[in-house]
Amino acid sequence: MRKILVIGAGQSGLQLALGLQSKGYEVTLMSNRTADEIRAGRVMSTQCMFHTALQHERDLQINFWESQAPRIEGLGVSVAAPGSHEAPEGSQRAIDWVGRLDGYAQSVDQRVKMAGWMETFAQRGGQLVIHGAAVSDLDFFAGRYDLTLVSAGKGELVSMFGRNPARSPYDAPQRALAVSYVHGVGPRPEHPEFEAVRCNLVPGVGELFVMPTLTTSGRADILFWEGIPGGPLDAFQGVTDPQEHLDLTLDLMKTFLPWEYARATKAELTDANGTLAGRYAPTVRNPIGRLPSGGLVLGVADVVVANDPITGQGSNSAAKCAASYLSAIVERGERPFDEEWMQSAFDRYWNTAQHVTKWTNAMLGPPPEHVLNLIGAAGQLQPAADRFANGFDDPSDFENFFYEPEKTNAYLASLTS
Ligand SMILES: Cc1cc2nc3c(=O)[nH]c(=O)nc-3n(C[C@H](O)[C@H](O)[C@H](O)COP(=O)(O)OP(=O)(O)OC[C@H]3O[C@@H](n4cnc5c(N)ncnc54)[C@H](O)[C@@H]3O)c2cc1C
């Protein structure tokens, strides 16, 4: 059977390793951390995944936490009224609606999922190597495998894959990220009967995402600030004490989004590793890495297409990339995984990924007037709210009603005529 080496045990690497294993490939997975280290380590993401991505996990029967994780049935958008944070007692929402998802979304803490998947991979007879791979390791190992896949996220190995400037409009981070996992958030008064991700936009300042998750200590909520660099939310760099991180998160919520703060006054961190802060530049890379000895490796998911998490797409994309590559590998049969095949495997994934990148990069900039109109109109037009929400599952639909004023206007007119 063909031998495949997978570097990096995240969403894409583990999904691919488990998928290839189930199809009889001889898979070696190299991870820089053990399952226990991942489980006891720092949170890595907010990892909200929508229907299509979750279905890829179901297809491989690795949706082990589906019955325990909260079902996220809606996606809400609130926009703080201009100037409201200057007079917090009068703070209001200029916009507030929730769209219903056709299929539910779920967030399973990557510490739970990756640790569990890694153990499953080993129990099923997979070769698990705990080692942080360097380029020299890849050079040594790659020749012994039919195919080497680099799914090491945004780590140092990305340097093997050249940046694609035509597909990477930003060369610096567009948001400062600050995540807190908490217990004790109260029910959502707007729609207590179902769970939702809430996107709270503070124009010119940033966004707060609030979502339920399943973490190492059970059900929890995530408070996730995305701050425009240099602005008032860009305040977490250098904060090392987790409690201080949470206090700052809550203070900023009180100032900018008092309706979200009202639910969170009793919030407590899930654990001492329940916070994360950082930033990175969204980057699309060339998919093929060339090793010093001339061997070729194929980049997977974040290695080749890393978008800002403002649209919550990275894990979804990682699942879609893994599913797409799995099909491409199986279809290849016994033929060589050469450069042409690698490029075609990536191009097939890019057919989906390009829509994610285009939409995410658009959401990072100030919204044009027709987008503001669309988001505003969704408060009165439930089909528009629902369609926007379901765009998180399939961002290609935004081509039909989001980017061009004519298409947005025609869509809104079709709902009111
Ligand atoms: C704050 C934040 C919030 C997010 N929220 C969401 C969200 O709500 N929804 C969503 O879909 N996405 C979200 N994302 C993005 C998502 O987490 C990532 O895009 C996704 O995890 C990428 O999967 P991956 O398999 O490419 O890489 P990763 O999940 O990063 O996995 C890579 C793995 O490789 C390992 N590794 C690195 N270097 C080496 C090496 N040299 N040798 C061996 N192993 C190595 C790493 O330790 C890691 O385990 C968020 C990201 C952040 C930062």
Image (cartoon, rainbow, N blue to C red):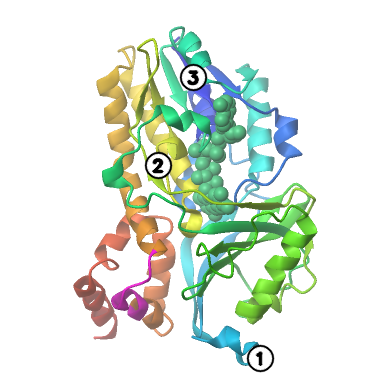
Q: Position of residue 401 (x, y in %)?
A: 27, 68
Q: Quadrant of ligand 1?
A: top right
Residue neighbourhood size for the residue with mark 3, other residues' Cα within 10 Å, grouped as few (<14), some (14–19), many (≥20) = some
Residue at image x 61%, y 90%? 87
Q: Which residue matches tag 1?
A: 89
Q: Reading the chain from its start, which is encountered first: label 1 or label 2? A: 1
Residue neighbourhood size for the residue with mark 1, other residues' Cα within 10 Å, grouped as few (<14), some (14–19), many (≥20) = few
Which of the 4 image quadrants contains residue 225?
A: bottom right
Distance in Å between CA atoms under marks 2 and 3: 20 Å
**CB of mark 2 near ligand 1 (< 8 Å):** no
* Amino acid type at mark 1: Glu
The mark found on residue 135 in the picture is 3
Q: Position of residue 32 (x, y in %)?
A: 63, 26
Q: Is residue 63 above or below residue 212?
A: above
The mark found on residue 12 in the picture is none
The range drawn in magenta is 365-373
Q: Is residue 405 above or below residue 39?
A: below
Name the residue nearer the viewer: 324 or 314: 314
* Amino acid type at mark 3: Val
Q: Residue furthest top?
A: 144
Q: Are marks 3 and 1 in contact (CB under 8 Å)?
A: no
Distance in Å between CA atoms under marks 1 and 2: 42 Å
Q: Residue furthest bottom?
A: 90
- Residue 192 in sight from this viewpoint: no
Q: Which residue matches tag 2?
A: 305
Q: Are marks 1 and 2 in contact (CB under 8 Å)?
A: no
Task: Give the side of residue 295 with respect to residue 344, left or right.
Answer: right
